[in-house]
Amino acid sequence: MKAVIEALRTLSPRDYRVLNGIERGMARFLYVPVNEIAKLSSLEVDEVLLITKRLNALNLVQRRVGSYTGYILTSRGYDCLALYTLVKRGILKSIAASPIGRGKESDVYKAVTLSGKIVAVKFHRVGRTSFRQTRRFRTYVGERGHISWLYQSRLAASNEYKALQILHEKGVSVPEPIDWTRHVVVCSYINGIELSEGPKLDDAECFREQLLYEISQAYRAGVVHGDLSEYNVIIYHEKPVIFDWPQWVSSSHPLALYYLRRDLDNILRFFKRRYRLNYDLDNIIRKIIGG
């Protein structure tokens, strides 16, 4: 992120036009030809050659030379475009250079808005561990043929932001959605402890019931998390906040009950293992579906 922040301070509007042109061209080309970049950015070829040379030196784009010279965005270049957009919209003022969280498919940073509010900025990195696996298990990918890591990360961010909007509006305990662009979601920063750390709870059973209630409320709002575990729950003032929603499915999805059962089983097994709380999974599912 430090390199991205430094690049943001040096890039000109024409540099961003070239980055944006490459981004648009990647929908059609594995490596976007220089002539196509010039057309998409409304610049002369000679100027594009100079700009891409500098962007390549900054590791914002990657060049391929073969039957033609072409470019693609790197993750650093995509980060620059996303942050540039959020700054231009007046959403972000600054962002930390080091992440506060790093998962298999995302990095999370603290940032500050123009009003001085601390927020969380999540960069989706879909395919960082296994691109093929993400195609198998992400419903938002659908039947698309050619789909780059860049576009798949964008779909994940869009999907998560949509879930947060639905759930926050219905009063479910999730981070407040603020904005999103490309592969980045901005939401409220929750200064709590992850449930996965297994902290001492004043009343573990009461906390578990609160969490089940939030899962139930999400289901009634039409959303099933799809990948819920103790790693997706924050304890904030002794109450649960559920985060990380890119894999959610609709409650009307043919596999919704399968994912709901899996989510609940993950959570309930954790509470049994860590806090020795027994459970009847089928009875809990019946209460959530019919409650």
Image (cartoon, rainbow, N blue to C red):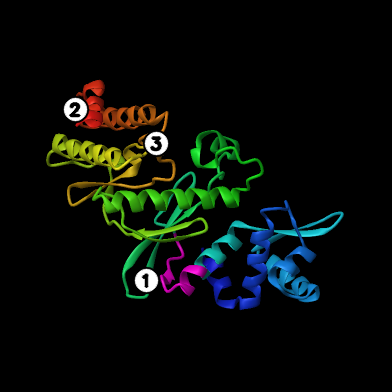
Q: Please, what secondary structure does the residue beneath circle 2 have?
A: loop
Q: Nearer the viewer, mark 1 or mark 2?
A: 1
Amino acid type at image mark 3: Gly
Q: Residue at x 17, y 47 (%)?
A: 238
Q: Nearer the viewer, mark 2 or mark 3?
A: 3
- Disc 1 secondary structure class: strand
Estimate the spatial distance between the alpha carbons at disc 2 and disc 3, rounded to whole Å. Answer: 23 Å
Residue carrying label 2: 277
Residue at the (42%, 29%) spot, across then down: 254
CA gap between label 1 and label 3 equals 31 Å
Q: Earlier in the sequence, mark 2 or mark 3?
A: 3
Q: Is residue 168 above or below residue 274?
A: below
Residue 113 got which mark? 1
Q: Mark 3: give few (<14), some (14-19) or many (20+) Cα within 10 Å.
A: many
Amino acid type assigned to the residue bearing label 1 in the image: Thr
Q: Earlier in the sequence, mark 1 or mark 2?
A: 1
Residue 290 sits above or below residue 246 on the image = above
The magenta stretch spans residue 92? yes
Which x, y percent locates residue 12? 62, 78
Q: Disc 3 marks which residue?
A: 226
Q: Are marks 2 and 3 in contact (CB under 8 Å)?
A: no
